[in-house]
Image (cartoon, grey):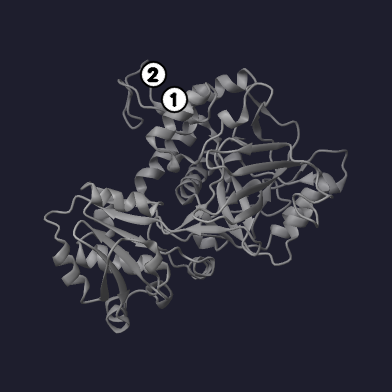
Amino acid sequence: MARLYPFRALRYDPARVNMEDVVTQPYDKITPAMQQRYYEASPYNLIRVILGKHEPGDTDPQDFLPAGEQAHNVYTRAAETLREWRRDRILAEESEPAVYGYSQTYEVPGTSETRERRGFIALGHLYDYADKVVYRHEQTFPKHKSDRLALFKATRAYCEQIYMLYSDPAFTAEKLIFGASGPNGPDTAPADLAITDEYNVVHRVWKISDPSIINLLLTAMADKKLIIADGHHRYETSVAYAKERSAQLKLPFKQPIPGDEHGSPSVIADGDTRSMLPTPAFPEAAMMMTFVNMDAPGITILPTHRVVHGLPSFSSPDFVTKASAYFNVKELDSPALTALNATQGTAFLAATGDGNYLLTPKPDVIAQALKGISPRQAQLDVVQLHSIILDKLLGLDQDTITRLGNVRYIREASEATALVTSGDADIAFLIKPITLDQLRDISLSGDVMPQKSTDFYPKLLSGLAIYALD
């Protein structure tokens, strides 16, 4: 049972700030240059909370400090910043519980096609993967989770959303939130917030506070299986935090039974049963999420290319020789994606300083090499790349990649190949994107792909709403 909740969001006051100057892309998509730009855009830009700057003399969050000595680091500054903004009403809490319709209108990168992705923001109950309510599709990096946990504990707030997918061919949520004619139809109220981000994506938000609509929406979502599209690190960190707090509070981490003493709904209007809205058993038991219907149009998945650096004595001819044992290798004049995208089935392009090569698998050899991996995974480009090329041919197993950081994950093919041309990388691998059907099949079967196997576009803006635990 997928349990969702409305919440009283903290939101920026548009009368006090220019909204386009204070919102950001998700923390893990922010480069140092973007971070500096956000800092300069506004003294109230959310970057100061989700990804602050390190300063000389900062204390380590893990260090034991002598009595009377205060910690000073990015996390303590984030918490103080959030307190100041709330005190000064830069951020104000909504007067009533709500969910928020959310649409994003964008141009698909590399094309002239315009799409619209629709969903809604609410709190989602936190589950272990073993409960088979929430499903992951890729592995995570431990370092990222420890960073987010320190931030969550310091700020006691979730400023960013997890991007969740679910399936509903009847489009129940869309009809309840946007009306039968869609977000721009005559039966839809004007958005109460519209923002255009740096990628020219238009983000629109509708506040839904009618208890009857909220209850219908929550009921419609109760039987849904949820797949994490973006936010695996934040989700797993939030689960760990919820378990820690449930132990401290002596409350069960497991999903409460509706109507029991820890899961009873809050009544917000004169006992009218239509306005009885559920709340989490304790604040940390849920996290802010955006829910998007996989059956609706508008979802775009981009490839995430791999760039490998720091290999001792890398040789392009040696690599080609080794790769030829597993793949058909065709030399290309340039690392253009045209040849890759025109190739049916599994394929990827290797760009080196000495040449560019299109690799397609030798099925029998690949099947033997990946016999310990499920067939649904073994057919994926990204799995063959990691399990055979990175691991067997280049000596970079998952532990080595995590420990040494020899692999960079890059959206733009031109940026990936430029690093090779400049000598800053040994080899770049350009790959095709995972399809939505492949992701659904992998996730619901319990399989897990390598890190950064997908790049959902566009990203959810941070700062549209904040879930404060206190």
Residue 328 appears anywhere in the view = yes
Left or right, residue 252 beside residue 101: left
Residue 359 percent across, percent down from the top left: 30, 71
Left or right, residue 126 beside residue 451: right
Real-space Cα distance between discs 2 and 1? 9 Å
Left or right, residue 1 beside residue 55: right
Residue 49 percent across, percent down from the top left: 49, 29
Vertical position of residue 361 compared to residue 12: above or below: below
Dot 2 and dot 1 residues touching (CB under 8 Å): yes
Say which residue appears at 44% left-offset and 48% top-offset: 233
Vertical position of residue 155 compared to residue 120: above or below: above
The amino acid at mark 2 is Gln
Residue sitting at the far left: 313
Say which residue appears at 54% left-offset and 49% top-offset: 458
For this rendering, which residue is in front, 117 or 292?
117
Closer to the N terminus: mark 2 or mark 1?
2
For this rendering, which residue is in front, 222 or 452?
452
Q: Quadrant of residue 364?
A: bottom left
**Mark 1 lies on residue:** 76
Q: For the residue carrying disc 2, how many other residues have a C-alpha within 10 Å: few (<14), some (14-19), or many (20+)?
A: few
The amino acid at mark 1 is Thr
Say which residue appears at 29% left-offset and 67% top-offset: 387
Q: For the residue carrying disc 1, how many other residues have a C-alpha within 10 Å: few (<14), some (14-19), or many (20+)?
A: many
Numbered circle sitting on residue 10: none
**Mark 2 lies on residue:** 70
Which tag is nearer the camera, tag 2 or tag 1?
Answer: 1
Q: Secondary structure at mark 1?
A: helix
Residue 206 percent across, percent down from the top left: 73, 42
Q: Specify the quadrant that holds the C terminus.
A: top right
For this rendering, which residue is in front, 34 or 337?
337
Residue 253 appears anywhere in the view = no
